């Protein structure tokens, strides 16, 4: 039986990936996809949702001859990241549902 991750866990993982890489000033889309273990199409939907909600900023940057997409947390995104950490801890980790 295939178990799908709840959306809150996916959002938390994406925000966590951005937060972890933001020490370098940004998180690259490719790294977010790999870190959050999502397919590109799913990642795009979640990243669009988070951008539209004001949790993340998206910007295009040049990297050599290529153009890359980079993300960073907004102050609201940082606040929501803490919320999602607490929610996931309460719902999944304490109840034993955190096992994937």
Image: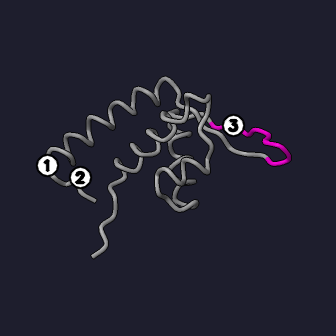
Picture quarter with the C terminus = bottom left
- Identify the residue shown where x is 49% and y is 23%: 75
Q: Could you tell me how far apart the alpha carbons at marks 1 and 3 are, in whole angstroms? A: 38 Å
Q: Quadrant of residue 72?
A: top right
Residue 17 position in % (x across, y down): 48, 41
- Write down the residue under mark 2: 98
Q: What element carries label 2?
A: loop
In this view, the mark in front (2 or 3):
2
Image disc number at residue 8: none
Instruction: From the viewer's side, name the closer residue of 28 and 57.
Output: 28
Q: Could you tell me how far apart the alpha carbons at marks 1 and 2 are, in whole angstroms? A: 8 Å
Residue 22 position in % (x across, y down): 55, 31
Instruction: From the viewer's side, name the closer residue of 24 and 3.
Output: 24
- Write down the residue under mark 1: 95
Q: Where does the magenta region start and end?
A: 58-66
Instruction: From the viewer's side, name the closer residue of 31 and 78.
Output: 31
């Amino acid at each position: 039986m295939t178990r799908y991750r709840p959306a809150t866990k996916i959002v938390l993982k994406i925000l966590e990936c951005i937060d972890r890489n933001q020490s370098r000033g940004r998180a690259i889309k490719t790294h977010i996809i790999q870190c959050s273990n999502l397919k590109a199409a799913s990642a795009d939907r979640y990243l669009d949702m988070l951008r539209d909600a004001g949790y993340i900023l998206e910007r295009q940057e040049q990297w050599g001859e290529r153009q890359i997409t980079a993300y960073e947390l907004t102050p609201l995104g940082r606040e929501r990241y803490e919320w999602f950490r607490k929610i996931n801890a309460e719902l999944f980790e304490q109840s034993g549902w955190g096992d994937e």
